Image (cartoon, helix red, strand yellow):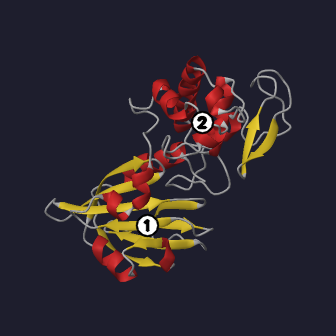
């Protein structure tokens, strides 16, 4: 699933190519890819004639601000890529991808295509005058962004104190921190020297300070690399990210640790994989 760095990379790409371009229409090729409105026709009618302003990111959600022809608010285009979603900025002469679910047409002969093999991704049109979290209810459950001042070691201590659950599971809770997922939780835990199975209640404030710094470091590095290369993630031009080649532990089971040389191990926690070095992480 695309995580914060991948979604942020898509956001930056969309802001480079799609702003100030009127939407002239579109086609919904899989009805369940549109979460709101319930009608495909209402979704397309709501967007047609509007112009995309700035794209924002909240956790793993994308929100495109819309304006009408007079520059007045036109609501939002919301997107959640989920497991395999992609937003591709293409010209109409490009063959339509086999898993293309929604096409939005623009005045300058470009398209924004939503491609989603597993079909878990969703799009929303949020009407003007309506707060996005009223329609996209998942936004209501999100914790602070990792780069916000409210996300700190002190915040982690307050939220995790006394909790008898593995730290890896806690980091995947979007109510604790928005946008962090399996890849970067593994990477941050490695850099902080914490095993994924360590109980939250056992982690001291100094170690939480290391963890907080590690989270910011791995996210920054991955954003600079354009995200992680895995089978379904693409930026708006269809290009994979470059972080995967320098990952510390994620998806490196059996390979030597880049620090000590011990084989990286993999275990399951609450149905999710966790990669770690048994020597460097205690």
Q: Earlier in the sequence, mark 1 or mark 2?
A: 1
* Vertical side of 44 occupied by 276: above or below: above
Q: Nearer the viewer, residue 250 or 55?
A: 250
Q: What element carries label 2?
A: loop
Identity of the residue furthest to the left in this view: 70
Q: Is mark 1 on a helix, strand or loop?
A: strand
- Binning the other alpha carbons within 10 Å of mark 2 as few (below 14), some (14 to 19) or many (20 upward) gives few
Q: Where is residue 77 in the image (x, y as percent from the top left)?
A: 35, 62
Residue 111 makes an appearance in the image: no
Identity of the residue furthest to the front in this view: 162
* Vertical side of 135 occupied by 34: above or below: below
Q: Position of residue 76 (x, y in %)?
A: 31, 61
Q: In percent of the image, x 47 and y 35: which residue is there?
A: 146
* Vertical side of 190 occupied by 9: above or below: below
- Binning the other alpha carbons within 10 Å of mark 1 as few (below 14), some (14 to 19) or many (20 upward) gives many
Total tally of numbered discs in the picture: 2
Q: In percent of the image, x 30 and y 70: which residue is there?
A: 47
Residue ID for mark 2: 163
* Vertical side of 48 occupied by 175: above or below: above
Q: Position of residue 159 (x, y in %)?
A: 50, 34
Quarter of the image for residue 107 reads bottom left
Q: Which mark is residue 123?
A: 1
Image side of residue 187 versus residue 262, left or right: left
Image side of residue 160 versus residue 125, left or right: right
Mark 1 or 2, which is nearer the eye?
A: 2
Measure how far apart labels 1 and 2 are at the Cα level: 35 Å
Identity of the residue furthest to the top in this view: 206
């Amino acid at each position: 699933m695309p995580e914060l760095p991948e979604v942020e990379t898509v956001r930056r790409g969309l802001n480079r190519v799609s702003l100030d371009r009127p939407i002239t229409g579109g086609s919904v090729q899989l009805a369940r890819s549109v979460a709101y409105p319930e009608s495909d026709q209402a979704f397309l009618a709501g967007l047609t004639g509007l112009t995309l302003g700035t794209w924002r990111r909240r956790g793993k959600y994308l929100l495109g601000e819309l304006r009408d022809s007079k520059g007045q608010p036109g609501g939002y285009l919301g997107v959640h890529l989920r497991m395999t979603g992609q937003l591709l900025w293409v010209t109409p002469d490009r063959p339509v991808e086999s898993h293309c679910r929604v096409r939005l047409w623009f005045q300058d002969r470009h398209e924004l295509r939503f491609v989603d093999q597993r079909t878990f991704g969703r799009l929303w049109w949020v009407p003007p005058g309506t707060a996005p979290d009223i329609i996209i209810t998942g936004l209501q459950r999100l914790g602070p962004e990792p780069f916000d001042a409210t996300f700190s070691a002190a915040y982690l201590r307050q939220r995790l104190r006394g909790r008898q659950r593995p730290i890896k599971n806690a980091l995947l809770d979007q109510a604790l921190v928005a946008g962090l997922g399996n890849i970067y939780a593994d990477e941050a835990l490695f850099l902080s020297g914490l095993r994924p199975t360590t109980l939250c209640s056992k982690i001291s404030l100094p170690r939480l300070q290391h963890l907080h710094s590690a989270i910011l470091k791995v996210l920054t590095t991955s954003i600079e690399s354009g995200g992680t290369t895995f089978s379904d993630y693409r930026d708006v031009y269809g290009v994979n990210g470059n972080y995967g080649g320098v990952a510390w532990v994620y998806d490196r089971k059996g390979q030597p640790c880049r620090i000590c040389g011990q084989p990286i191990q993999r275990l399951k926690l609450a149905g999710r994989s966790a990669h770690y070095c048994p020597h460097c992480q205690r």
